[in-house]
Amino acid sequence: MLIGLMGLTIIIHLIDTLAYSVRLNSVKSGKFALSMSLFNIFVLISRTANMFQAPLIGGLIGISIIKNYNPINDIRLVIFSSTVGTILGILLIPTFLKLFGKAVDKLEVKGSVPSIVVEALSINNIKRIVKSTTKPRKKMIHSLRYKEIPKRFLILNTVITSIYTIGVISAYYAAYFVDEEYVLAASASSGMINGIATIILTLLVDPKSAIITDQVLRNKRPYGDVKALVIMLIGTKILGTLLGQLLIYPAAILIASFYK
């Protein structure tokens, strides 16, 4: 169960990390709507994995309650998997952008996402994908105008990422610290926690990143600004997953305190 949970967590955070890089393709190609339409299939995979993640976390905590042992070490491994998934996403960004750009061009011609997916799964195309693997280069992060990206915005993204990383896990973990009659109530708090994080993200983070991206699209900012934005958002995502390691225990205790 733990291995499967870690694998799903890696997939979720890998896809979330690649989501940041879609901005680069959409700005460079000028095909923002097409890029987002194609990326929806990757989001669907991530959301599907997320659906399976919650029951596995519930099962892990349920077993720990029955056997009366603190699952904190297993939980930290799951959170560590989110960091691993983010790092893997960073390593795959150059290859992903290369393949994603070609897929967007094909979508414009064929007009069907399923047909592109079926074509991509053919043996010959899988071989081409493997050969298209591109390593990240240091010049990607040099000479960018990082000072143009608001620091408060980045701090906020770090905090929100940490909440997303531990939101579901901390609620289920809180069930370990409450009386039997409040176990379901504590675990159900995960929706409320992630809901608050979503509201903050929608109101404060997404608009600012959208403004910078739109300014680059309208040539009011250089392309390097959106690249700096993506790199720093991903950097703060890593920090957010690491911050989750520090927050997981106090977050669970805080949630549990409402049910005592």
Image (cartoon, rainbow, N blue to C red):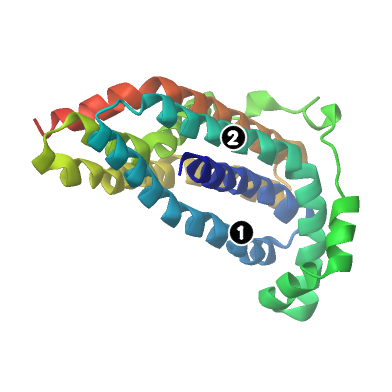
The picture places residue 75, in percent across and down from the top left corner, at 41, 31
The image quadrant of residue 116 is bottom right
Callout 2: few (<14), some (14-19), or many (20+) C-alpha neighbours within 10 Å? many
Of the pair 70 and 242, the residue shown nearer to us: 70
Front position among marks 2 and 1: 1
- How crowded pointer 1 is (Cα within 10 Å; few <14, some 14-19, many 20+) is rated as some
> Compared with residue 176, is residue 215 higher up or lower down, i.e. above or below?
below
Evaluate whether residue 222 shows in this view: no
Residue 124 visible in the displayed image: yes
Residue at position x 24%, y 29% from top?
68
Query: Which residue is under mark 2?
Result: 233
Q: Would you name the residue on which mark 1 appears?
A: 42
| Numbered label tally | 2
Q: Quadrant of the N terminus?
A: top left
- Image spot of residue 127 (x, y percent): 88, 59
Instruction: Give how far across and how far down residue 257 sits, in percent.
Output: 15, 28
Tell me the kind of residue under disc 1. Answer: Phe
Which structural element holds mark 1?
helix
Instruction: Between residue 172 and residue 15, name the one nearer to us.
Output: 172
- Which type of secondary structure does the marked residue at label 2 adopt? helix
**Which part of the image, by quadrant, shows the C terminus?**
top left
Q: Nearer the viewer, residue 104 or 49?
A: 49
Question: Where is 14 relative to 38, above or below?
Answer: above
